[in-house]
Amino acid sequence: MILTVHHVTRYSYDAPVRGLVQSHRLTPASHAGQRVIDWSVQVSNGIRGGCFRDGAGDMFESWSVTGPVTEVEVSVMGRVETSDQLGVLRGHREMVDPTCYLRDTPLTHPGGTIRALAAEAQGREPLQVAHHLAARVAEEIVWTPGATEAGTTATEALARGKGVCQDHAHTLIAAARHAGMPARYIAGYMVADGTQDAAHAWAEVFVAGLGWVGFDAANRCCPDDRYIRLASGFDAQDAAPIRGSARGGGGEVLDVTVAVHQAQQ
């Protein structure tokens, strides 16, 4: 199907900033499951810098804004043709050895409850292990907006039993890594009614003989043609589509709107 994306991120400052620099991973790469038809990223009063594809196959682009400014808007619009690959990432160009994704981060360090969850999957085939862990994470963490924060760890989310897609992804990643399977965080988009206040996230687990397979524990499924894959990383902080810093100024207010719809064909 063809999906349309309109994603706006607005930064407001209570005092003018002298300028800011940002690194974006806001342009999806084409692979077997998605083909970019047209795509545009614009930054208000922004100066576009360099662009490159990193070792994980993600597209990076730098931007800078010269102040003084009190508001900066990052606007993303585009169309992507998607197809259902049963969750398997095919045709994605990358050079990173999957085993590097066995490394823990503070957000994905496995506490005792996560280690116990991973132990339940012992004795199964690798793909069965990944499916089992995704199902268990979905059972243990109830989708509850506002129940966690950006810095909530996988162990904390599992203990609370509530969270959002970031928490589902972090917990599945932590459990899979503890079970000896490389796993990474994916930021992207998913078709939804109306508008959302954030992009979507899920996990990919590396299955020997098959490759990277996506698991969206929050929605109890593997990514299909309703999804657009945007960026990857060890955790949500590492895979953030926008990273940057501002010089000077005071408090910052962030407002995000995301609309992803199926286009009329």
Image (spheres, rainbow, N blue to C red):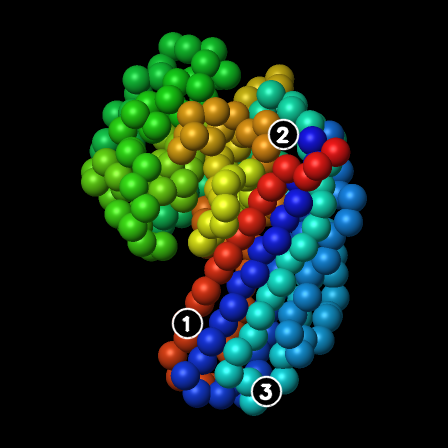
Question: Label for residue 253?
Answer: 1
Look at 45% across and 54% down and name the residue there: 197
Residue 143 horizontal side relative to residue 101, left or right: left
Instruction: Name the N-terminal-most of marks 2 and 1.
Output: 2
Image quarter of the C terminus? top right
Is residue 176 visible in the rendered image? The answer is: no
Q: Secondary structure at mark 1?
A: strand
Distance, label 3 to label 2, CA atoms, is 41 Å
**Vertical relation: 45 (above or below) 117:** below
Instruction: Name the N-terminal-most of marks 1 and 3.
Output: 3
Q: Position of residue 104 (x, y in %)?
A: 41, 42
The reply to whether the C-beta atoms of the residues labelled 3 and 2 are less than 8 Å apart is no
Look at 49% across and 72% down and name the residue there: 11
Number of other residues with Cα within 10 Å of mark 3, as a class: few under 14, some 14 to 19, many 20 or more: some
Residue 50 horizontal side relative to residue 185, left or right: right
Q: Position of residue 142 (x, y in %)?
A: 29, 34
Instruction: Name the N-terminal-most of marks 3 and 2.
Output: 3
Count numbered badges in the picture: 3
**Vertical relation: 77 (above or below) 108:** below
Is residue 227 visible in the rendered image? The answer is: yes
Residue designated by label 3: 67
State which quadrant residue 209 falls in: top right
Residue designated by label 2: 225
Distance, label 2 to label 1, CA atoms, is 33 Å
